[in-house]
Amino acid sequence: MLRSRALAGRRFETWEEVAEAVAQATERWNAHRQPVTGGQRRRHRPHRQPGIALLPKAA
């Protein structure tokens, strides 16, 4: 993640510049957090009612 967000396509002259780029990328990443689910986005799950399963309705 850091490689793609902070280091990809950039050239740095000093280690301080690398550290600053990583710090900025980390701040942006933390400001826009999303769950990490093994490379896939999390699917929406329908809201479940708490308690025991509902009984089938009689016709």
Image (cartoon, grey):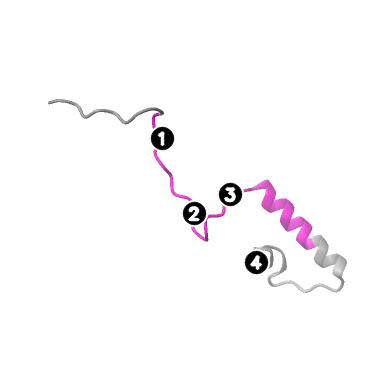
**Element marked by disc 1:** loop
The relative height of residue 50 versus residue 4 in the rendered view (above or below) is above
Tell whether position 15 is magenta: no
Left or right, 4 with reference to 56: right
The relative height of residue 29 versus residue 14 in the rendered view (above or below) is above
Q: Distance between the residues labelled 2 and 1?
A: 18 Å
Question: At which x and y percent is residue 27?
Answer: 74, 51
Magenta residues, dominant SS class? loop
Q: Which of marks 1 and 3 is in front?
A: 1
**Element marked by disc 3:** loop
Q: Which residue lies most toward the front here?
A: 52
Q: How crowded is mark 4: few (under 14 residues within 10 Å), some or many (20 or more)?
A: few
Q: Distance between the residues labelled 4 and 3?
A: 16 Å
Which residue is more in the foreground, 49 or 22? Answer: 49
Q: Residue 47 carries which label?
A: 1
Q: Which residue lies most toward the left here?
A: 59
Left or right, 29 with reference to 12: left
Q: Residues within 10 Å of mark 1 (few under 14, many from 20)?
A: few
Q: How crowded is mark 2: few (under 14 residues within 10 Å), some or many (20 or more)?
A: few
Q: Which mark is residue 41?
A: 2
For marks 3 and 2, the one nearer the N-term is 3
| Residue at image location 85% in from the left, 74% down from the top | 13
- The part of the chain drawn in magenta is 21-49
Identify the residue position indicated by label 4 in the image.
4
Q: Distance between the residues labelled 4 and 1?
A: 34 Å
Kind of residue at badge 3:
Gln
